[in-house]
Amino acid sequence: MNNLKLEKKINKYLKSNNIKDISINGLQIEGKKNINKIITCITINNLIIKKCIKNKYNTIICHHGLLWKNENLNIIGIKKKIIKNILINNINIYCWHLPLDIHPKIGNNIILAKKINVNIKKLPNKNYPLIIGYNNKKKIIKKILKLNIKFKFIKSKKKKIKKIAICTGKGDYYIEKCILKYNIDTYITGEISEYKIILSKNYDINLFILGHHNSEIYGMKTLSKKINKKYNIYTKFINIK
Ligand SMILES: [Zn+2]
């Protein structure tokens, strides 16, 4: 498939153009026109690029890419090295960040919620990229254990879970907003600062910290399968933390 055509199709499906994001979503670096094999991953890194070159892939789709609006725009140092390697080897780099977190069907939040059997009350949107739902505490713990990932659980004194918020990735910003706006008693996220951990203790809520990468595997895995099935392009999801 043509590289610009693929970008258009995924942008349309993920409604990327309507979503404000610090990431530049879509085709970040243009490589070969014709896409044959795609590596999908969470965060682009040197190891992924090496694998791409060695195994003759010409495209990488990631969730955390190389171009962020809040970063320095200079292409110097390690960034120059990485981008030079990508350009010389004619690799397409696509990135979908927030559009892949909040998508109502294949987003990181929704798939994690379904995997741990959260009964969904509110879907993520541009303003609150998170799921609100409920489930019982023991069942949630069992389901998270089944994900087979290391996680941290900071317990509340409350016996029952009545309302859960799930915010994959870095969940710092929304924790207090969720407590105040949605009256949640449980917060499930990827990564959180020490200050917000203390905050959750002060509010006495349950806090599950799954790890940034671990909480964001499912959206990309699903997108990877979807591209393979819908456009008949070989895709391989590589899970490098
Ligand atoms: Zn993330």
Image (tube, rainbow, N blue to C red):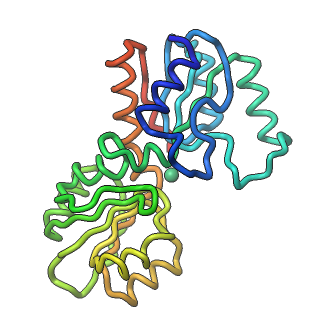
The residue that appears at 70% across and 55% down in the rendered structure is 70
The residue that appears at 18% across and 75% down in the rendered structure is 161
Residue 208: quadrant of the picture = bottom left
Q: How many marks?
A: 0
Relative to 239, residue 141 above or below = below
Residue 200: quadrant of the picture = bottom left
Rendering coords of residue 212 (x, y %): 47, 55
Relative to 41, residue 148 above or below = below
The residue that appears at 71% across and 17% down in the rendered structure is 89
Rendering coords of residue 204 (x, y %): 32, 87
Q: Is residue 150 left or right of residue 117?
A: right
Q: Nearer the viewer, residue 174 or 39?
A: 174
Relative to 187, residue 103 above or below = above
The residue that appears at 42% across and 15% down in the rendered structure is 234
Residue 14: quadrant of the picture = top left
Name of the residue lying farthest toward the bottom: 202
Q: Is residue 36 left or right of residue 150?
A: right
Q: Nearer the viewer, residue 36 or 81?
A: 36
Rendering coords of residue 90 (x, y %): 69, 16
Rendering coords of residue 197 (x, y %): 45, 78
Relative to 226, residue 21 above or below = below
Q: Is residue 191 left or right of residue 183?
A: right
